[in-house]
């Protein structure tokens, strides 16, 4: 973007206390990259406001320059084209206040989940956090957010009590279901397209006795493991949450020796109320696991063991919410997994849905009422590895799952270029557009995942 198009921002630079970078500035290209390095984005400007006053100045300047405003705290969920946008990073909004008597955390929109999880360790409370400690509470919660505890307490967005929102007209206020139910409904899943959130108030999870179990089986047991977990879902209590990961590790030098070239399947279970005999019985009936660990655990322990990357990383993937996991689909998935040409897909994760997800406590755009399984394919990009024929593998993964798709998926699991139309029925999407038009009639906010 030539400087001539950024004159108001160039002037704003003299008054903002935070950082404001334009394309000709040193370090712009590096700073403008999203956390997911596989996504190329070329915004018109990048800002790290120091406070609310900065934010107001930046929005006004972007409007004067004919730019849109896109809040992107880090860019795990970067979707692609941000040309003509001022990208805003919220790292200066880092307040964190726990109210354990009320079971609530109030958190600034630049705070990553790892900070909250660490602050809660040993308190008997847990957060409805995703698996990555470096994803922000805001980016996750405003996109729905599926956590280790979603069968117990619903989506992250279902636990959003209130938000502090800067409207495009400059008003900054706390909104909740009483003061502005339509805005709250939209923030629960479609956050970035209706307002700029500076802080969130979130329900915590009372969890004095978190218990976890982890089983690793040889890949040859994959069919039996998937069927056992599928059957367990029919009568599993909502306190039990289960993730399955089918892993095929590449022979990449960057990996530990014991993992290189190995194929295996893991089942991890987590409860908020102590040991789950249902899970133990189901897994032990499958056969002997090569590794089994069970016992009391904690969210910080789980986060540390998750192996999620904490540094910016190129990654690709695909995901789908399914309404069922029939034997025929499991067979097809395993046949797909056995084809050597689909080696770019290193992991396939299967998360058990249901439980509290079936009856959300609060009204929100994001919901997984009708889905029973959330699948995702992990396609990492290893340094030094040959360029991957990943597109064909992702397309085939999508094709295999297409017969069992649930009506909607959750926004935080959308891939690059996918839109919110995949996450809600047409009336819900129309309602979202209406909320956006009412709040942002001039289209100051970037269109995000809902094209105008
Ligand atoms: C390794 C890894 C693990 C993950 N695990 C999970 C998981 O377990 N469960 C899950 O649900 N998701 C998971 N995700 C997806 C992740 O939650 C989403 O991509 C999330 O949106 C990323 O958060 P972020 O902080 O990077 O936000 P960004 O990608 O920077 O922003 C995402 C969007 O959020 C909105 N937004 C963010 N902040 C604000 C704000 N202050 N005001 C208004 N709008 C805002 C904007 O629309 C923005 O486009 C994972 C992603 C990765 C890379």
Image (cartoon, rainbow, N blue to C red):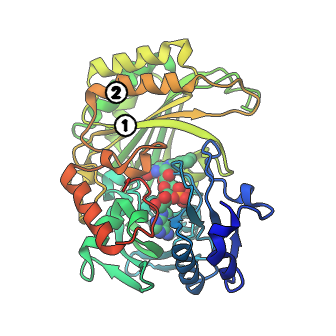
Residue at x 30%, y 31% (from the top left corner): 230
Mark 1: few, some, or many residues within 10 Å (few <14, many ≥20)?
A: many
Instruction: For label 2, count other residues whose C-alpha is less than 10 Å away and answer few (under 14), some (14-19) or many (20+).
Output: some
Left or right placement of residue 279 versus residue 380 in this view: left
Is the residue 408 above or below the residue 129 in the image? Answer: above
How far across and how far down the image is residue 78, in percent?
54, 51
* Ligand 1 within 8 Å, label 2 CB: no
Q: Is residue 138 visible?
A: no
Give the farthest residue toward the right.
Answer: 26
Is residue 69 shown left or right of residue 186? right
Q: Position of residue 382 (x, y in %)?
A: 69, 32
Q: Choose between 265 and 154: the one closer to the eye.
A: 154
Judge by depth and name the residue closer to the eye, 71 or 353: 71
Distance from disc 2 to disc 1, alpha carbons, whole Å, reads 7 Å
- Callout 1 secondary element: strand
Report the quarter where the N terminus lies.
bottom right
Circle 2 residue: 401
Q: Where is residue 405? Give x, y as percent.
A: 28, 33
Q: Nearer the viewer, residue 66 or 383?
A: 66
Q: Give me the residue at 23% from left, 64% from top.
A: 361
Q: Quadrant of the C terminus?
A: bottom left
Q: Which residue bears the numbered disc 1? A: 320
Identify the residue at horizontal 31%, vertical 78% (top origin).
Answer: 176
Q: Are marks 2 and 1 in contact (CB under 8 Å)?
A: yes
Along the line of sight, which residue is nearer the eye, 339 or 18?
Answer: 18
Residue found 67% across the figure and 58% down from its top: 32
Give the percent coordinates (x, y) of residue 213: 46, 42
Instruction: Give left or right: position of 448 versus 408.
Output: right
Q: Seen from this angle, which residue lies furthest front?
A: 4
């Amino acid at each position: 973007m030539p400087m001539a198009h950024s004159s108001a921002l160039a002037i704003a630079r003299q008054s903002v206390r935070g950082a404001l970078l334009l394309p000709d500035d040193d370090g712009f290209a590096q700073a403008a990259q999203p956390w997911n390095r596989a996504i190329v984005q070329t915004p018109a400007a990048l800002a790290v406001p120091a406070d609310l006053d900065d934010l107001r100045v930046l929005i006004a300047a972007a409007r004067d320059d004919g730019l849109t405003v896109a809040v992107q705290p880090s860019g795990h969920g970067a979707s692609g084209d941000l040309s003509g946008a001022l990208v805003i990073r919220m790292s200066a909004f880092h307040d964190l206040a726990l109210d354990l008597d009320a079971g609530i955390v109030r958190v600034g929109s630049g705070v990553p989940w790892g900070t909250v999880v660490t602050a809660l360790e040993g308190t008997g409370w847990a957060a409805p956090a995703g698996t990555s400690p470096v994803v922000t509470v805001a980016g996750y919660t405003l996109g729905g957010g599926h956590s280790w505890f979603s069968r117990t307490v619903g989506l992250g967005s279902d636990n959003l009590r209130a938000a502090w929102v800067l409207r495009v007209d400059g008003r900054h206020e706390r909104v909740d279901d009483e003061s502005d139910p339509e805005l709250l409904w939209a923030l629960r899943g479609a956050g970035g397209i209706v307002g700029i959130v500076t802080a969130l108030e979130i329900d915590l999870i009372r969890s004095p006795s978190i218990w976890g179990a982890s089983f690793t089986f040889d890949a040859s047991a994959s069919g039996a493991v998937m069927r056992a977990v599928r059957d367990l879902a029919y009568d599993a209590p909502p306190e039990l949450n289960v993730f399955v990961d089918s892993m095929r590790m590449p022979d990449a030098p960057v990996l530990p020796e014991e993992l290189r070239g190995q194929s295996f399947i893991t089942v991890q279970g987590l409860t908020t109320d102590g040991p789950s005999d249902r899970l133990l019985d189901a897994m032990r009936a499958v056969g002997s696991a090569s590794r089994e660990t069970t016992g009391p655990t904690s969210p910080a322990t789980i986060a540390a063991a998750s192996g999620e990357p904490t540094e910016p990383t190129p990654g690709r993937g695909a995901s789908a919410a399914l309404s069922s996991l029939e034997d025929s689909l499991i067979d097809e998935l395993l046949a797909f997994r056995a084809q050597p040409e689909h080696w770019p897909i290193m992991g396939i994760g299967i998360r058990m849905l249901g439980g509290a997800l079936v009856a959300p406590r609060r009204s929100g755009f994001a919901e997984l009422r009708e889905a029973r399984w959330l699948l995702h394919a992990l396609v990492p990009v290893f340094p030094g590895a040959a360029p991957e024929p990943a597109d064909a593998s992702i397309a085939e993964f999508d094709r295999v799952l297409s017969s069992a798709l649930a009506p909607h998926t959750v926004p935080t699991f959308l891939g690059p270029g996918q839109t919110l139309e995949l996450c809600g029925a047409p009336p819900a999407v129309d309602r979202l557009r209406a909320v956006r038009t009412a709040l942002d009639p001039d289209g100051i906010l970037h269109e995000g995942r809902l094209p105008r």
